[in-house]
Amino acid sequence: MAQEASSSTSSKTISLKTGDGEIFEIEASAAKQMKTVQRLIDDLGDDITIPLHNVFSKELPKIIEYYKKDITGEITKDFEAEFVKDLNDDEVKVLFLAANYLDANKLFEFLSQNIADRLESKSVEYVRKYFGVENDFTPEEESKLREERAWSFRGIKEDE
Amino acid sequence: MAEDDIISTLPDAILCHILSFLQTKQSVATRILSKRWNPLWRSVTTLRFNTKVTNQICNFDFNDFVYSVLLSRDATLPIKTFHLDIEYSEDVECPIKSITKWVNFVVQRGVEYLCLYLVSESRLKLPITILNCKTLVVLNLSGFRVEHCCFSSILLPSLKTFHLDYVEFPKLQDFMLFLTGCPILEDLLTSDVSFDSDESFDCSKWMSSLLTNLARAHIDCFSYYFPLKAVHNVQSLRFEFHQVYYHDDMIPTFHNLTQLKLICYDYSKDFLLDVLNHCPKLQSFDLDEVVKTEEALDKKEDKENWVFPDVVPQCLSLHLRTCNLLSFSGLHGELMLVRYILKNASVLQTMKIWNSGQPEIERILSELRPL
């Protein structure tokens, strides 16, 4: 929970620098929610611009937007629905990876759910592409797996 | 692309975490993605089964699938979440023994979130192993019959959330005894909870210690009688109620209640006053009325000639800060109610009145009454 104004840390802002060199400001209390950022602050001090090599200017503003709402306790189901509404599957994936890197738990959980929702009835091939998975089964191995009686594939789209 | 490289370096635990949000049949399907993915689904500690069983073949296949999952997964890991949502068509026999076995299996493996939603012709008896599950934190049930409740047979020491929908108990006493086995319960939701017999019994000895941690209760009893005294320790209550079930001593004193949302099909002045008189610390009060299609058949309160007493409920004089009256129709009795509250609520800050079907009338007041 954000503290009320008397403590100097709550109104302090932290500067974050993305992997592509852009700088964004975030409240210290929001930065606390991202454990990776907080660790860097603990190591480097809160006056320095914190470098985030693996997060870029495309996704960081969205993450900051989420945590701005979080520290005021305003995250609702409606807000979350709106937050991901216009994002395509790849944009969500990028945010998810960033949330993982930043160790931003709440956003990570929410995006995990959202990714699962998006993949819910997608085909095997789509899921492979999405996770960048190389299929290292031989065609024989794969068809043997598909045929195993116990695991019926009802409800999952076939590719061909 | 750079992202694909990063994603393929994600540790198994994170991939399993995503899998845990999928239906189990989906997560099992990922075993064909690649050799690395092949065993991942076995480490997922969340199991979700959702299906509609329309014929016997479907029934066998689904049962096979559930058993196969339970037997093939990593036996060294617990099952933290078990979510079963099944609808059985009329001519399909609900496999009671199998479902009971599955529940027993997950209870023995440390389940924390257990959601069992069943739709079938006859209600399933709740597997009794649930009644003593030390690890259970959330229990959501729909479509069950709960028996075998007696003192000390029920102990759910970790249960914080309990949602019941369309659940029946043989006696009122069984339901109350169930609640005594939930000492740290914080969140209770009941909807269509019914009792074969609602004969009263003496529970005065342990009443005061019942559900002392209850923060929120949502009681939906439009169609059934509900023993309100079970939740008398609650802090925030949402109560959906049919006036026809009102009787004189049904409302207990809610010593801790600060927030009340009342949704009634019809309400009388006596009922309202009874409620307010039993909520001495009430700070926020919402009153809503629903219109039901059987309205024409039941005799409704005419809300005329309402005269409010001079004696004022303690919550009005001392605590009530917010009042919302929804579905306001401007009837005489309603206006009398508004006047009564405005006149007597010394610390009232906000009163909002919502007029259905017309632009909302909103009135915000700041009462600064010298003592």
Image: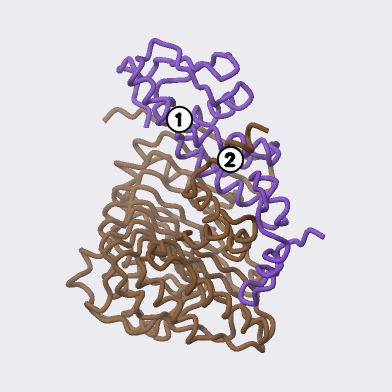
Q: Which residue is mark 1?
A: A72
Helix, strand or loop status at disc 1: loop
Examine the image and state in which quarter residue B107 appears. bottom left
Report how far apart the C-alphas of labels 2 and 1 lie in the structure: 32 Å
| Disc 2 and disc 1 in contact, CB within 8 angstroms | no
Of A111 and B274, which appears nearest the observer? A111
Q: Residue at x 60, y 61 (%)?
A: B31
Residue at 17% across, 72% down: B205
Please rate how many residues cluster around mark 2, counting C-alpha atoms within 10 Å: few if below 14, some from 14 to 19, many from 20. Answer: some
Residue type, numbered disc 2 = Ile
Q: Secondary structure at mark 2?
A: helix
Between A87 and A93, the one nearer to me in the picture: A93
Q: Which mark is residue B57?
A: none
* Image quarter of the C terminus of chain A: bottom right
Question: Label 2: which residue?
Answer: B7
**The disc labelled 1 sits on which kind of residue?**
Thr
> Which residue occupies the foreground of this view, B144 or A49?
A49
Question: In the image, is residue B211 above or below residue B175?
Answer: above
**Crowding near pointer 1: few (<14 within 10 Å), some, many (20+)?**
few
Quarter of the figure with the N terminus of chain A: top left
Image quarter for residue B164?
Answer: bottom left
Report the residue that reaches farthest toward the left: B205
Q: Chain of mark 1?
A: A
Q: Colour of chain A?
A: purple
* Drawing shade for chain B: brown
**In the rendered image of this protein, does residue A46 appear above or below residue B332?**
above
